[in-house]
Image (cartoon, rainbow, N blue to C red):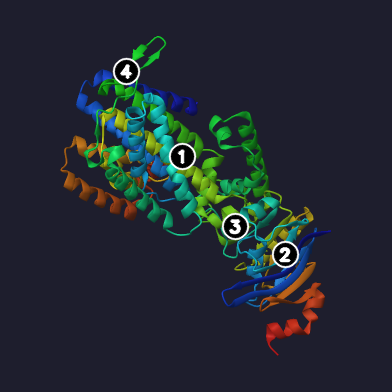
């Protein structure tokens, strides 16, 4: 019965999320939500790596940029249709993760984090320097939006403005969240966590950690890349700073504050640190200061983040009720 | 029947000779103990057999197939389970999940099956759950299957580590100092557990310092000193051996 109630509650929440534009007629708020969902995907991809497999990646911003540029260049230079270009952008980001996996997983220690930091900086540098392809620091303007689709009953939908784009990004977000949920609550997630907990013991029960790490990194890079493609198609402009290393670092902060290794932790963190300061119009300089303070406080006081605190409260209330 | 045969195992770390040509056999169904002073190469030998160290020289065969120098996960899949000297668990997973992870080498469902939650995946998960619960019952940990593994008391940790290694029915189980840090009563319970593991058809090889434990339990004892085998035989034979006495007590 409680499971049924929970399913109804989830469906209700999803319905409300889809109906928000009907009630909130503000372009500004919906725009914020679109950015929130896109950047949440980056945090989710970071969390899959760090929270489950224990790999600290700083390259998620780089993959985001690759996805954005992949979409832009495939559509504008190669003349691809928008949807395949979007998927291909994510796939290119994922393929770029493979050599990093090949190089770093043979080494022990912090080499993975260092390598991903280097990768993120290299991606930004290449996007800046390779003027022939990317028009360098000028960026590329006039990126076409996602092509419209026609659905039965609903008819033709285009994604040209904020209000029509919101359901698209929400659908992608929910689908990816579902995939992450199914993966992490299965044998795959269990294996990832085993590697995070103890790599030697994992080896001794027949797990090939390097294979699973590479798979996890591949999926994670793809999610960031897909988020970047959504961003480019929405904003219509890409710039080397679209791949800024800070995007990945911000995903890290949001994930840790929200709760690593939980499904909704990165989303909650992004809402609190990404969207709330925007609504409250906090000065960007002060924002960075707040992020730092939040990170330190959470690591010191509640290492499992906000989701961890909520879990504890729920357990305590259950005990009291009993 | 010979289960594991190791010939001329040498292992050096830089200039240090940890193992200097060890030959030994493990036969199906027996319980072999490896004893020796600290630094005599016992754990190194385990690590070489299970692939965590590559042998500098020598061959290792398990059920007739060469396994020397293979990756640890491949050796595990061939059917050699092990525990570690410092008890290793997946600390932030539940006790039950720890044991289910131990079944990894027997699972065949792929990522796509897990995503689709198809029949093959669900059947396999159900099978794993039943097997893991039965194993927890066997090591007497069924009352704490939902607890996190990390905070368990030390004897429970030891038994859980054995359960993780044993649940996938390995042909050979290597235990690195299972009795270290246990009190007298716990050692007796551990001895009973090892006997019932042996009775269930699993071949055991145990590194241990507690001599009474070793002598009462083992079918055969091998003594290592400074990286080479100095004696081998039944517990009674070995304890009479002059070189063993010299190695342990000094001349």
- The span from disc 4 to disc 2 (Cα, nearest Å) is 67 Å
Kindly indicate whether the residue at mark 1 contacts the one at mark 2 (C-beta within 8 angstroms).
Answer: no
Between label 2 and label 3, give the one nearer the viewer: 2
- Residue for point 33% across, 30% down: A77
Give the residue pinned by disc 2. Answer: B59
Q: Secondary structure at mark 1?
A: helix
Give the residue pinned by disc 3. Answer: B156
Q: Nearer the viewer, residue A95 or A173?
A: A95
A190 sits left or right of A83 in the view: right
Are labels 4 and 3 assigned to the same chain?
A: no
Residue A91 horizontal/vertical position (percent)? 44, 36
Give the residue pinned by disc 1. Answer: A219
Question: Is residue A121 in view from this perspective?
Answer: yes
Are labels 1 and 4 assigned to the same chain?
A: yes
Question: Is residue B213 in view from this perspective?
Answer: no
Between label 4 and label 3, give the one nearer the viewer: 4
- Residue for point 77% across, 55% down: B63
- The span from disc 4 to disc 3 (Cα, nearest Å) is 61 Å
Residue A287 horizontal/vertical position (percent)? 20, 45
Work out which residue is located at the far top of the displayed protein and give it: A153
- Quadrant containing the C terminus of chain A in the rendered view: top left
**For residue B235, what is the image quadrant?**
bottom right
Q: Secondary structure at mark 3?
A: helix
């Amino acid at each position: 019965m409680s499971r049924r109630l929970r399913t109804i509650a989830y469906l209700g929440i999803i319905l409300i999320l889809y109906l928000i534009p009907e009630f909130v007629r503000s372009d500004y708020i919906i725009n914020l939500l679109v950015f929130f969902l896109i950047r949440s995907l980056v945090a989710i991809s970071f969390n899959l790596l760090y929270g489950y497999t224990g790999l600290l990646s700083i390259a998620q911003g780089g993959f985001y940029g690759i996805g954005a540029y992949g979409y832009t260049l495939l559509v504008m230079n190669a003349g691809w249709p928008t949807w395949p270009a979007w998927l291909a952008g994510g796939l290119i980001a994922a393929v770029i993760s493979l050599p990093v996996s090949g190089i770093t997983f043979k080494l022990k220690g912090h080499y993975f984090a260092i390598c991903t930091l280097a990768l993120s900086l290299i991606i930004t540098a290449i996007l800046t320097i390779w003027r022939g392809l990317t028009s360098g620091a000028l960026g590329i303007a006039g990126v076409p939006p996602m092509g419209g689709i026609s659905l039965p009953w609903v008819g033709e939908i285009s994604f040209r403005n904020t209000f029509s784009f919101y359901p698209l990004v929400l659908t992608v977000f929910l689908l990816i969240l579902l995939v992450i949920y199914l993966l992490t609550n299965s044998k795959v997630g269990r294996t990832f966590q085993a590697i995070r907990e103890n790599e030697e013991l994992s080896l001794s029960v027949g797990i090939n950690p390097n294979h699973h790490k590479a798979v996890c990194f591949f999926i994670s890079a793809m999610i960031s890349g897909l988020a970047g493609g959504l961003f480019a198609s929405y904003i219509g402009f890409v710039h080397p700073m679209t791949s800024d290393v800070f995007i990945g670092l911000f995903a890290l902060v949001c994930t840790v504050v929200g709760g690593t290794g939980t499904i909704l932790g990165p989303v909650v963190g992004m809402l609190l640190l990404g969207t709330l300061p925007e609504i409250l119009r906090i000065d960007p300089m002060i924002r960075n200061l707040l992020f730092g303070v939040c990170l330190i406080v959470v690591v010191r006081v509640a290492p499992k983040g906000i989701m961890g605190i909520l879990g504890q409260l729920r357990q305590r209330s259950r005990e009291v009720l009993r | 029947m010979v289960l594991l045969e190791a010939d001329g195992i040498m292992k050096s770390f830089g200039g240090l000779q940890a193992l200097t040509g060890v030959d030994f056999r493990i036969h199906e169904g027996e319980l072999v103990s490896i004893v020796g002073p600290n630094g005599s190469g016992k754990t190194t030998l385990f690590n070489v057999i299970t692939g965590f160290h590559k042998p500098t020289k020598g061959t290792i065969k398990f059920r007739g197939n060469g396994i020397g120098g293979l990756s640890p996960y491949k050796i595990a899949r061939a059917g050699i389970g092990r525990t570690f000297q410092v008890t290793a668990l997946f600390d932030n997973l539940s006790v039950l999940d720890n044991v289910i992870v131990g079944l990894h080498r027997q699972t065949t469902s792929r990522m796509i099956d897990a995503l689709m939650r198809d029949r093959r995946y669900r059947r396999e998960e159900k099978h794993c759950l039943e097997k893991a619960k039965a194993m927890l019952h066997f090591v007497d940990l069924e009352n704490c299957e939902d607890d996190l593994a990390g905070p368990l008391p030390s004897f429970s940790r030891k038994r859980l580590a054995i359960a993780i290694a044993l649940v996938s029915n390995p042909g050979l189980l290597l235990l690195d100092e299972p009795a270290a840090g246990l009190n007298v009563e716990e050692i007796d319970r551990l001895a009973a557990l090892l006997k019932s593991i042996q009775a269930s058809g699993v071949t055991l090889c145990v590194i241990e310092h507690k001599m009474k434990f070793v002598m009462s339990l083992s079918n055969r004892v091998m003594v290592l000193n400074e990286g080479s085998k100095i004696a081998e035989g039944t517990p009674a034979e070995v304890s009479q051996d002059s070189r063993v006495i010299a190695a342990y007590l000094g001349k």
